Image: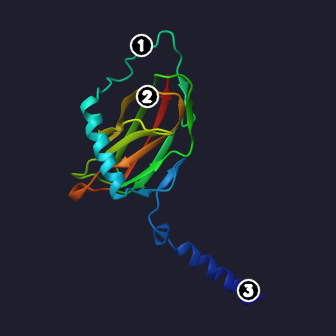
Amino acid sequence: MKTTIVASIALSLLTCAVTPSAFGDEVNKSGFSAQHKMTANELAQHQKELQTANLQRVQDQGYKFDFSNKDPKPSLTSPNWSYSALWPGHYIDTNTTYTTTTNGEQVVVKLVQYPDLATYGSYVAKASYQLVGSSYIQPYQVTGNYDSTNFTFSFYNVPIGTWRLRIFNDTSGSGAVNMAGNGYVYYY
């Protein structure tokens, strides 16, 4: 009996002494898939899509939208998605999906993003956000540390379909850093 109690206590102490980092740095996430490292083909395609998207990009100025005869429908990914420890060159997808029911809907993303560090120093978060489903919507890249203020952008003319939000960590080179963030998705 004494041996069993001592062994049980020793095992409990050993279990408490093992930190989560001993099991690897997996993404701490709320409602996301496991991280995926971009293959060379995925990276080339992503960079090509970013170049095209950046040429066509029009940044919103907050929520200055005219929806006088439309009511916003919060998506199933609302009210919140959050993640941390997203590695450079990796992406994650929301587990939850939402459905647009008419062609040409506007999907609004309101987010914060920042380096996953206690102090940022010279590190700057750089991520791309993309709607993925049976087709893909061109990604929208956001560069900057947004932690006390948020950043808002829209995907326009989204076709009928079921979508997930994909988030790419686009930091690289000497600026490569794990990222964290959270946000909301709305569609009209």
**Quadrant of the frame with the N terminus:** bottom right
Seen from the viewer's position, the closer of residues 115 and 31 is 31
Q: Is residue 125 left or right of residue 25?
A: left
* Residue lying furthest top: 68
The residue that disc 3 covers is 4
Look at the image and tell me whether residue 12 can be seen.
Answer: yes
Which residue is at 51% across, 9% downward?
69
Q: Is residue 31 above or below residue 185?
A: below
Q: N-terminal of the two: label 3 or label 2? A: 3
Q: Percent position (x, y) of residue 59?
A: 30, 27
Image-quadrant location for residue 90? bottom left
Image-quadrant location for residue 110? top left
The residue that disc 1 covers is 66
Measure how far apart labels 2 and 1 are at the Cα level.
13 Å
User: Could you tell me the amino acid type at mark 1?
Assistant: Asp
User: Could you tell me the amino acid type at mark 2?
Assistant: Val
Q: What kind of element bears circle 3?
A: helix
The residue that disc 2 covers is 108
Q: What kind of element bears circle 2?
A: strand
Which residue is at 68% across, 81% downward?
8
Q: Percent position (x, y) of residue 175?
A: 23, 55
Seen from the viewer's position, the closer of residues 119 and 27 is 27
Contact (Cβ within 8 Å) of mark 3 with mark 2 = no
Q: Is residue 66 above or below residue 89?
A: above
Q: Is residue 7 left or right of residue 25?
A: right
Report the disc number at residue 26. Answer: none
Q: Check disc 3: other Cα within 10 Å, few if <14, some if 14-19, many if 20+.
A: few
